[in-house]
């Protein structure tokens, strides 16, 4: 049986660990729960800490999912399917994922991703251009139809 002081100390240590983990970027509740349990904190302490963090609006899965979507759109465009997969792996609920990813335009994101890659593909022959850009867009989770359309559009813009 833990003393009140030991319980308070454990609670404070887990809160400190959670805040340090949140210091790098927003996290989902599941990520925090997993991290704290890996650090050896018991489930009662973790639940108490997560409740406090939610009350302070430091843990919010909807806000986290929105952050993740915006971050992907701005810095590393990916397909809707891949963003949904990433959010699922972070422990975000399915209804939150579908709410946040509604309205994502795969065609636009594929084009934006291709634009960033074009400077590396300049001067290539058409088969090499298609291979490189197609492989890049496949890794970003886009389907064949969108990749084909994006490659054609990019090839016309390169001026060949």
Image (cartoon, rainbow, N blue to C red):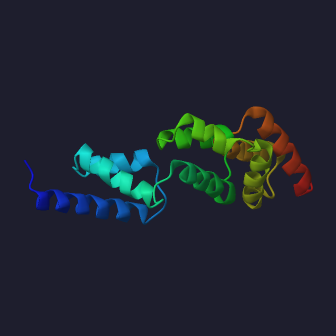
Q: Is residue 79 visible?
A: no
- In the image, 132 versus 145, the foreground residue is 145
Residue located 42% across and 61% down the image = 22
Residue located 73% across and 47% down the image = 133
In the image, residue 43 lies at what x, y percent? 26, 44
In the image, residue 113 lies at what x, y percent? 72, 53
Q: Is residue 89 visible?
A: yes
Classify 138 as above or below 41: above
Q: Quadrant of residue 54?
A: bottom left
Residue located 51% across and 41% down the image = 92
Compared across the picture, whether 128 is left or right of 17 comes to right
Figure label count: 0
In the image, residue 158 lies at what x, y percent? 87, 56
Q: Quadrant of residue 127?
A: top right
Classify 7 as above or below 31: below
Residue located 42% across and 66% down the image = 23
In the image, residue 115 lies at what x, y percent? 78, 57
- In the image, 64 versus 68, the foreground residue is 64
Classify 54 as above or below 134: below
- In the image, 131 versus 87, the foreground residue is 87
């Amino acid at each position: 049986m833990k003393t009140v002081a030991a319980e308070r100390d454990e609670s404070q240590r887990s809160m400190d660990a959670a805040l340090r983990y949140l210091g790098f970027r927003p996290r989902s509740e599941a990520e925090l729960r997993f991290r704290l349990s890996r650090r050896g904190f018991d489930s009662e302490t973790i639940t108490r800490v997560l409740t406090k963090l939610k009350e302070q609006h430091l843990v919010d899965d909807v806000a986290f999912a929105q952050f993740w979507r915006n971050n992907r759109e701005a810095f590393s465009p990916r397909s809707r399917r891949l963003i949904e997969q990433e959010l699922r792996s972070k422990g975000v609920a399915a209804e939150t994922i579908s709410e946040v990813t509604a309205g994502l335009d795969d065609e636009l994101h594929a084009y934006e991703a291709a634009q960033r890659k074009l400077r590396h593909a300049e001067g290539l022959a058409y088969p090499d251009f298609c291979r490189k850009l197609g492989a890049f867009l496949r890794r970003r989770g886009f389907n064949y139809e969108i990749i084909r359309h994006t490659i054609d559009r990019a090839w016309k813009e390169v001026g060949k």
